[in-house]
Image: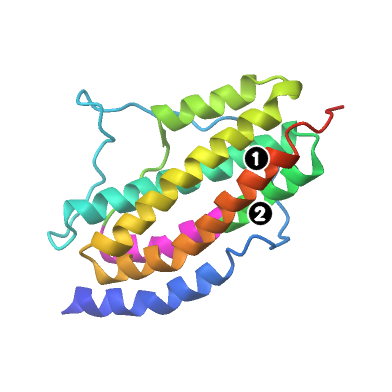
Amino acid sequence: MKLNYRLLTTTAAIAGALALSACGDKNTADEATSTAPGAELTEQGQLPEATSGNVAADQGSIDFIQKAALSDMFEVEASKIALAKSSSPSIKAYAQSMMTAHTATTAALKPVADALMIAPPMQLDSDHAAKLEDLNKATVKEFDEKYIDQQTDAHEDALNLLNDQAKNGTNATLKSFAAATAPKVQMHLDMAKKLDKSDVDEPNN
């Protein structure tokens, strides 16, 4: 009963934090940082399991929290690189909005993970880390297209994850979180596709 009470009280925190994730937020970004270190996959090619001290947290909920955390972490780190390397004002604006939005969803998910006693990953897995390395190695001329391609793929994956959780998840709070977040991720995906058509061909200085 104590755990159920804690889960119910996270709803207000989620609603408040998600309100911060609108793409037009103009919060100042942190300075661009270097690539986050990657965590190795298991021998079976799976992400290492998040730890859970509560049997009520089923493996589906653990997997969702872990993948959502990795997605947010990747978006923030990739966008820091974009702010440092891109010369396109539109792409820089997009990157700033991604940093703001995905920092907010990380904050919104934290109380749910805490209530379930699930520890999200603290560093990127090898696949996401390799993508950041590709961005860091990209020339100025090729950077914008590579960044937008990655953003399109990442948001398609995130949208599928959220829609699946909203439909098939077993935890009511996580289902609500996914349902509330999916429209925002759809907006991010639509923005990325528009950038793909209009901005990657902008001349770089």
Decide whether the magenta segment is chiefly helix, strand or loop.
Answer: helix
| Crowd around label 1: few <14 · some 14–19 · many ≥20 (10 Å) | many
Spot occupied by residue 128 in the image (x, y as percentages of width and height):
45, 32
User: Image point 42% across, 38% down: which residue?
Assistant: 123
Q: Name the secondary structure under disc 1.
A: helix
Camera sees residue 82:
yes
Spot occupied by residue 205 in the image (x, y as percentages of width and height):
87, 27
Region in magenta: 102-117
Give amino acid for label 1. Lys
User: Image point 59% across, 67% down: which residue?
Assistant: 20
Q: Name the secondary structure under disc 2.
A: helix
* Front-lying residue, 66 or 196: 196
Camera sees residue 103:
no
Give amino acid for label 2. Ser
Asked whether the residues under the numbered discs 1 and 2 touch, taking CB atoms below 8 Å apart as contact, a structural biologist would say: no
Q: Quadrant of residue 152?
A: top right
Q: Is residue 11 magenta?
A: no
Of all residues, the one furthest to the left in this rendering is 55
- The residue labelled by disc 1 is 80
Q: Measure how far apart labels 1 and 2 are at the Cα level.
A: 11 Å
Count of numbered circles in the view: 2
Of all residues, the one furthest to the right in this rendering is 205
Q: Which mark is residue 194?
A: none
- Could you tell me which quadrant the N terminus lies in? bottom left
- The residue labelled by disc 2 is 97
Q: Is residue 111 magenta?
A: yes
